Amino acid sequence: MQRKPNIIFFFSDQQRWDTVGCYGQKLNVTPNLDRMAEEGVRFEYAFTCQPVCGPARACLQTGKYATEIGCYRNDIALPQDQKTIAHWFSEAGYEVAYIGKWHLASTGKKFDYRTKPVPMERRGGWKDYWLASDVLEFTSHGYDGYLYDGDMNKVEFKGYRADCMTDFALDYLRKRQAGELGAPDKPFFLFLSYIEPHHQNDRNRYEGPIGSKEKFKDFEVPGDLQDTEGDWRENYPDYLGCCWSLDYSLGRIRGELDKLNLTDDTVIFYTSDHGSHFRTRNSEYKRSCHENSIRIPMIAYGPGFYGGKVIKELVSLIDVPPTLLTCAGIEVPDYMRGRPVQQLLEGKVEDWPQEVFLQISESHVGRAIRTKRWKYSVKAVDKDGWNDMGSDVYMEDCLYDLEKDPYEKNNLVADPGYTKVRSQLAERLKERMKQAGEDIPEIIPYKMA
């Protein structure tokens, strides 16, 4: 019987797709990721299903939409009765390991593990190896910080944070392969959750490695940021520096897999939880329907993901859990909302969804779909984005023609010439909400204030 592949899930935080060379970045920010795309599979149009940290992670762990789990915003712990991908992989004979940012253990002051060790029952089934912080931006800065190990002991680190997370991952791989940790005869699933290139909350800025400001000062301004305010002017070089550090880490991990003779037996999956619009769409960095908030890189390499292929169908973060299970030959449960992207690689699928569906919280209660041409979003005008999960009534908020207006500068939601388009998209949105387990709402036309 052929051994099941190891899996390394390389997860960044708040990374725009266009920071990566193979998606159009002109500076030399991601040579290792670009090489992985040349050898593996790149998904040209990949999107989050919820553009904020905690909810996106809850979706990724369970394969369900955020409202189904109850984790519709940050600071809501993953319910302990949820079956996660870690549980599925454990049942399939895998060792499961988690390193980095978790962001699914705390709920307000009642269960506050933001700077404390996360107890076993709140780790979502990641039971074999654990070295993490519930809210990593609270226990570290760009340089220096601490995590907690599986025995709830503080583990301090000195140096650039992304480098240190990678050091921990390399140590895990080496010890495991040497028989000092776990059972090297079993396949492993390592979930490696970085916080870069997320801004450092308490310092209100992006923190790239020293030298980033000079190294990436000659960046080309992305089209969506041109002629906008926001804080990208002072932050973009450091933001690219963060992305460069992740790419360097990826190169180190791939190099170690070569040394340990694990490359041929390991799938590496790289993606992010959401993007960043640099305070050009609202008062912070995500929580909006726009491309710079929702579009992410997604690249895979390893068994089943070879050949330098580029998939141009729309894929979502909600498709990742069934994809990972399929890598291991685990039957995908019916409750998972996404579909394994392997169906696209086989080229046989004719009924792949023609839009991605998004739920938006905190900034407002919103829902959106993104088709190959259109972006259509609605929001609940009488609900609170922090306290309300959904609504029975939404108002149209945005309509963008992405073929004519890829940077979403011209909102067509009030244009009478697009009434039919909006009506058609509203019906598609309602259907996707129904599929996500939500009640079908009333969607009313946009009204000028």
Image (cartoon, helix red, strand yellow):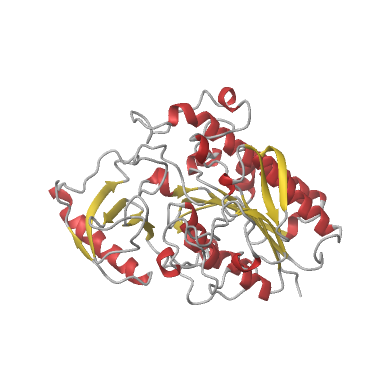
> Residue 367, relative to residue 21: is it above or below?
below
Q: Quadrant of residue 143?
A: top right
Give the quadrant of the N terminus. bottom right
Spot occupied by residue 17 in the image (x, y as percentages of width and height): 49, 44
Q: Is residue 258 left or right of residue 243?
A: right
Q: Nearer the viewer, residue 271 or 266?
A: 271
The structure residue drawn at horizontal position 62% and vertical position 67%, both measured from the top left corner, is 86
> Residue 43, relative to residue 345: is it above or below?
above
Q: Is residue 160 left or right of residue 66?
A: right
The structure residue drawn at horizontal position 38% and vertical position 69%, both measured from the top left corner, is 436
Q: Nearer the viewer, residue 292 or 393?
A: 393
The structure residue drawn at horizontal position 59% and vertical position 28%, both measured from the top left corner, is 212
Q: Is residue 249 left or right of residue 333?
A: right
Res 203 visible: yes
Spot occupied by residue 58 in the image (x, y as percentages of width and height): 50, 62
Spot occupied by residue 236 in the image (x, y as percentages of width and height): 49, 31
Q: Quadrant of residue 210?
A: top right
Number of marks in the rendered image: 0
Res 342 visible: no
Spot occupied by residue 237 in the image (x, y as percentages of width and height): 53, 29
